[in-house]
Amino acid sequence: LLKNLAQQFAIYSTGRDLAFSDRGEIASLIDRTQKQGGGIRTLIHELIQSSFFQTR
């Protein structure tokens, strides 16, 4: 569930489909979120703070 949410939020927030090269960044995003409890709010905060979001 968390993986799907991360992918869908990433697609929505960047306005583009995910590329194969984005898999590592999404996996890292999921790991950081799980270490902090795995909540949706945490996922959104981690996504916004990620280089994936800020450079796209």
Image (cartoon, helix red, strand yellow):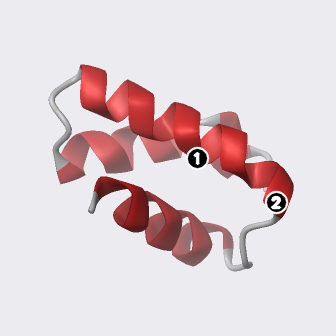
- Residue 20: give its label: 2
Q: Is residue 28 above or below residue 25?
A: above
* Position of residue 8 measured from the top left corner of the image (x, y, whole percent): 47, 73
- Residue 36: give its label: none
Q: Is residue 25 left or right of residue 42?
A: right
Rendered residue at 33%/33% (across/down): 33
Amino acid beneath label 1: Ile
Q: Is residue 18 above or below residue 35?
A: below
Rendered residue at 55%/32% (across/down): 28
Amino acid beneath label 2: Phe
The C terminus lies in quadrant: bottom right
Q: Is residue 40 left or right of residue 53?
A: left
* Position of residue 4 measured from the top left corner of the image (x, y, whole percent): 40, 67
Front residue (pair 11, 55):
11
Q: Is residue 15 left or right of residue 41?
A: right
| Upstream in sequence: badge 2 or badge 1 | 2
Per the image, label 1 sits on a secondary structure element best described as helix
Rendered residue at 30%/55% (across/down): 2
- Which residue is the site of mark 1? 26
